[in-house]
């Protein structure tokens, strides 16, 4: 059994990543041989996200946690990019309101900024997944989900901006999707689907 540390304390992200990795990694000696643990199980301070891109932040978190725990670590840096706001909130999505992880306040601020109905409400969710080992080696993958911003919150599922994001071609927000439905189309699912077949081999190399 190989341990893989997920470099987040967000229970929603951990559950989603664990679900998708197990589903995508169907080959023997891959997902079935990997035990997923949260960074919350270790005595490690939160990693300061000092990068200027999703890629830089994801890699920073993965490398820091891998070196601190001695286990391979998988980190996600993701966010919502709204065209009318010049790509904001972007890498600041989780702390857009000024308080990290306050989903309600973040959504309220974003909706207020888009309250002018003449503004383009198109946007995209972006996720970058970095998988690193304590020796500094790493692999990365990126996924995007195009869509638009709803005028108000709808749905109780998901987390973050899910209740106000409508995927392209849909009339429902991600907050109205069942978890298994979201796993098929989400930005994080797309990034994980790309990196999943490489996880077992990468972890066991070296």
Image: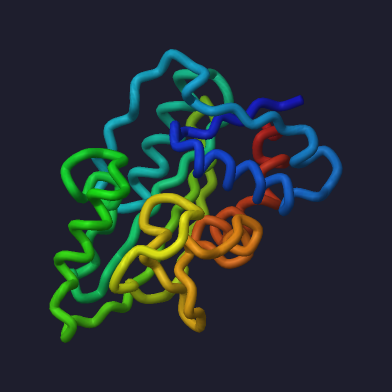
Image-based side of 201 in relation to 175, left or right: right
Residue 41 in the image: above or below residue 170: above
Q: Residue at x 36, y 65 (%)?
A: 164
Residue 155 in the image: above or below residue 167: above
Q: Residue at x 79, y 37 (%)?
A: 32
Residue 125: % across, % down: 40, 64
Q: Quadrant of the N terminus?
A: top right
User: Front-most of 181 and 90?
Assistant: 181
Q: Is residue 25 visible?
A: yes
Residue 181: % across, % down: 63, 64
Q: Quadrant of the C terminus?
A: top right
Residue 6: % across, % down: 53, 34
Q: Residue at x 36, y 57 (%)?
A: 161
Farthest-out residue, right:
28
Farthest-out residue, top:
43
Number of numbered tags placed on the structure image: 0
Farthest-out residue, bottom:
118
Q: Residue at x 34, y 73 (%)?
A: 150
Image-based side of 38 in relation to 118, left or right: right
Q: Is residue 194 visible?
A: no
Image-based side of 195 in relation to 115, left or right: right
Residue 58: % across, % down: 40, 44
Colouring style: rainbow
């Amino acid at each position: 059994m190989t341990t893989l540390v997920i470099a987040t304390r967000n229970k929603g992200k951990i559950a989603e990543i664990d679900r998708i990795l197990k589903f995508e990694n169907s080959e023997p000696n891959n997902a079935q041989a990997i035990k997923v643990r949260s960074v919350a199980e270790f005595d490690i301070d939160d990693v300061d996200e000092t990068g200027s891109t999703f890629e830089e932040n994801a890699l920073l978190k993965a490398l820091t946690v891998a070196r601190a725990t001695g286990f391979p670590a998988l980190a996600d840096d993701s966010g919502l990019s709204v065209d009318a706001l010049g790509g904001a909130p972007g890498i600041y999505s989780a702390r857009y309101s000024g308080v990290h992880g306050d989903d309600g306040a973040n959504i309220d601020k974003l909706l207020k900024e888009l309250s002018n109905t003449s503004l383009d409400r198109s946007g995209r969710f972006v996720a970058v997944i970095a998988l690193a080992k304590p020796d500094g080696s790493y692999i990365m993958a990126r996924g995007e989900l195009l869509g638009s911003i709803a005028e108000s919150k709808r749905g109780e599922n998901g987390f973050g901006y899910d209740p106000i994001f409508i995927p392209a071609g849909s009339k429902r927000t991600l907050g109205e999707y069942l978890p298994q439905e979201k796993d098929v189309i989400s930005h994080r699912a797309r990034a994980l689907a790309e990196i999943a077949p490489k996880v077992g081999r990468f972890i066991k190399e070296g």
